[in-house]
Amino acid sequence: MTMAPKREAYDVVVVGAGPAGLAAAATSAEAGLLTLLLDENIGPGGQVYRAIASTPVTERNQLGADYWVGADLVQALRTSDAEIIQRATVWSLDRNLEIAVSVGGASAFVKARRVILATGALERPFPIPGWTLPGVMTAGAAQTMLKSSALVPDGRTVIAGQGPLLWLLAAQILRLGGRIDRILDTTERGNYFAALPHVFAFLTSPYFAKGLAMMREVRAKVQVVSGVTELAASGDGQLASVNYVAGGKRETTPADLLLLHQGVVPNVNLAMAAGIEHRWDDLQLCWSPVLDASGNSSVAGIAIAGDGAGIGGAGAAVVRGRIAARAAVEALAPAVAAKLTPMAALRADLAKAERGRIFLDTLFRPAPQFRIPSGDTIVCRCEEVTAKDILDAVAIGATGPNQLKAYRRTGMGPCQGRLCGLTVTELMAQARAKSPQEIGYYRLRAPVKPITLAELAAVPKTEADVKAVVRG
Amino acid sequence: MTRHVDAIVVGGGIHGCSTALHLCLAGLKPVLIEKDYAGRHASGVNAGGVRQLARHIPEIPLSIRSMGIWEKITDLLDDDCSFESHGQVLVAENEDELAACRARVAELNALGFVHEELIDATELRRLVPAVADTCPGGVVSRRDGAANPAQATTAFRRKAEQLGATVHEGTAATNIRHSDGIWHVDVGAQSYTAPVLVNAAGAWAGTIAAALGEPVPVETVAPMLMITSRVPHFIDPVVILRGRKLSFKQFKNGTVLIGGGHLATPYQDRNETVLDWKSLATSARTVFELFPVMRDATIMRAWAGIEAKTKDDLPVFGPSARHRGLYHQFGFSLHGFQLGPGAGAVMAELIVNGGTQTRIGDLSIDRFHSPTL
């Protein structure tokens, strides 16, 4: 079922059907605004509610109660008048709110009066020696397979890293009968003390009880090694073993699969390509868009909700989606806005949903050695550029990620910096003794996801094409 | 704090960097002032064409001068700038266009220029096997080629600095003024003075010239480019079309650069451009028709660089018509990259020797101010 947008113009276009996008589109459509929701996946849900309408996993407790919240959001949206297009890849957005979207191999352009970006998060790069070996993948990729196809690992499996998603994934794999041989926890010991001042907020947050129960559940079944300070994958053309240091002791464990995870970061590509201002977030160690309290960005008419606005989790994403949509309704149909949940109530909901976040961010702040690699460790997978290559380029004059492109082509491959951008910024910042904010990020450009030349060539002609254009 | 130097060059594109380098080679100590970083705009993000082919006649001598430098670029910069010479080919898509090519080559030959050579369908097919069968011939300039623009501009900047130029990046030159034969420029809290000022500020140069009483008809434009994923090697020379806006080049790594001068909307004050995808689609259609091998390639990225275009598409190059010690080097109108090395060499000759053997008279700023206009 691949359909192009029915209209050329909408009041509100929402990009992404995760928690924020689902909530935003429903709020906007319920208020009577012409609403289009564009989502890249085959069904709604984003990452956290992936395959919510189609998952083969029917035993509800295997994926957890939080997962099934997504079903209600989808239901609310489907009863609204919002137009929803799945497998729709938005590949361009500019400050004139012109959107280019690819659906079923054909591209269309739509114009919006308001855009709400809900493009969510990406897993933070985890550049350790050997991370490009077959057999090493991200926890998120494993979770995608689990949710959409009920596939779980059955070979010798090691999970390494830190963060709430790591424990959630481990619990889900175990509940579905999958195999985990060892968990290597890279949380820095010092983080426990740093997080202590925020512990009260966390204890009273929705995360606490669930998180604790999940960790207990996993620890009962799997050997967990804490305080891992070094990590490497090795093998000849295929992962064979994982080497690590914990408590000063070096260990090697054989493995067929290594799942890496050290948290998620905002997926900034579309927002940055649209020219939206971002700033370096020193706590979450990533780029976050500069937003006002309603999620409005530096580009007039574009708001950002959900984890793309700064990592806040699914609960916060839903509220941020509602806030951004309410702001759009206030701007486009003020009379209707009065009938919606008051902004003050939404902001109170958000404060509640965000409770405990600082504790998690502080506790699970990844250690420098797992963010800033050295030597022959690959940073840019597309162009196979190592940490040493980048330092060499800095030595002969590359001052930031954009200059580095000229020397090493980093960020110019198919991933458009998604797998190397943060590493490059932090590596160059360290090498040049500057802050990441001063070093900056790649200037990102459309198409945010590649499109074929044939697809672009098939875009409907314009008046300008008809005019004879003669080279001077 | 004020520092006196031999020359102030405003603008860190390939032109400003090349001029700074050549001034150093002549024994001067210039300062180069760039508001962003060297190569941030058109110089760093253009198609990298090193082209004598299909140039306006008044700039051909400068282009030929430049070509000689490009061919020995490693000797000059200790950096090969990824320069490759596989020729540039102008493709005629029909007999009318081929007739125009024939006339053009004859005109050049009559003027004593021999770098452009008329080719028939057989030679065209030999040089560009992938081109559509219907094309009857074209023109080749065999010494032409391409370089990596950001690498080249950066290499000029680096070499200039090594040879004694002061490079001041990240702050704009402001308050440009002159008194008693000395130019003064502020760069943040720092000031520079010098007997010579070179205006090589690209899209920002028109404003500087106007403020100094020499307005020229110049606009800011942002030509768009796009690059594809890697495809198997199928073409060596750079290809441009006679009748349609297209330039086309495959890099060693297999990626293909598609350009040709369709324009984005520049937002100069924000250093930003908004792409026009419907125009880029026109380029995609042209490639689709001419190079069937490209149809399944994917477009990875598109962009545009901000630069200056004059009313007659010729650069403003040479001494000011109004002020002693002021030199202009801007308005290269979408084809300035190849000229950079030669223009810097000639500019240094103008500044140091007061003249040059290279014919540049038709590029002077006074063509816009002659009383007959």
Image: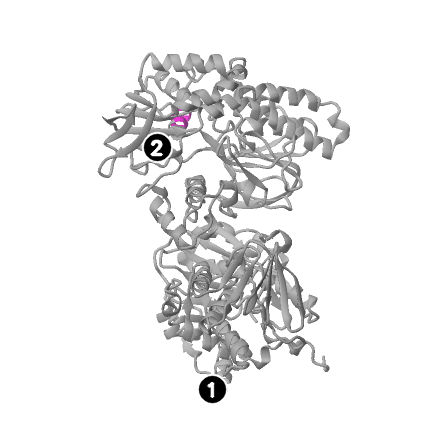
Q: Residue at x 62, y 63 (%)?
A: B185
Quadrant of res A145: top left
Residue B102 in percent (x, y) is at 48, 81
Count of numbered circles on the image: 2
Up the image or down, A404 lies above or below A352; here it is below
Amino acid type, callout 1: Gly
Q: For this view, does A273 lie left or right of residue B79?
A: right
Quadrant of res A167: top left
In the depicted view, which residue is nearer to us: B353 or A354? B353
Which residue was labeled with disc 1? B112
Q: Is residue B92 visible?
A: no
In the depicted view, which residue is nearer to us: B190 or B122? B190
Q: Residue at x 47, y 59 (%)?
A: B258
Chain letter of mark 1 equals: B
Q: For this view, does A164 lie left or right of residue B367?
A: left
Label 1 sits on a secondary structure element that is loop
Up the image or down, A214 lies above or below A416; here it is above
Amino acid type, callout 2: Met
Up the image or down, B1 lies above or below A144; here it is below
Q: Is B62 one of the magenta-colored residues?
A: no
Residue A214 in percent (x, y) is at 41, 14
Magenta stretch: give its range. Answer: A143-148
Which residue was labeled with disc 2? A137
In the depicted view, which residue is nearer to us: B360 or A453? B360
Q: Main secondary structure of the magenta part?
A: helix
Q: How far apart are labels 1 and 2 at the CA level?
A: 64 Å
Q: Residues within 10 Å of mark 1 (few under 14, many from 20)?
A: few
Residue B201 in percent (x, y) is at 58, 64
Q: Is residue B278 visible?
A: yes
Q: For this view, does B14 lie left or right of residue B68?
A: right
The mark found on residue B244 in the picture is none
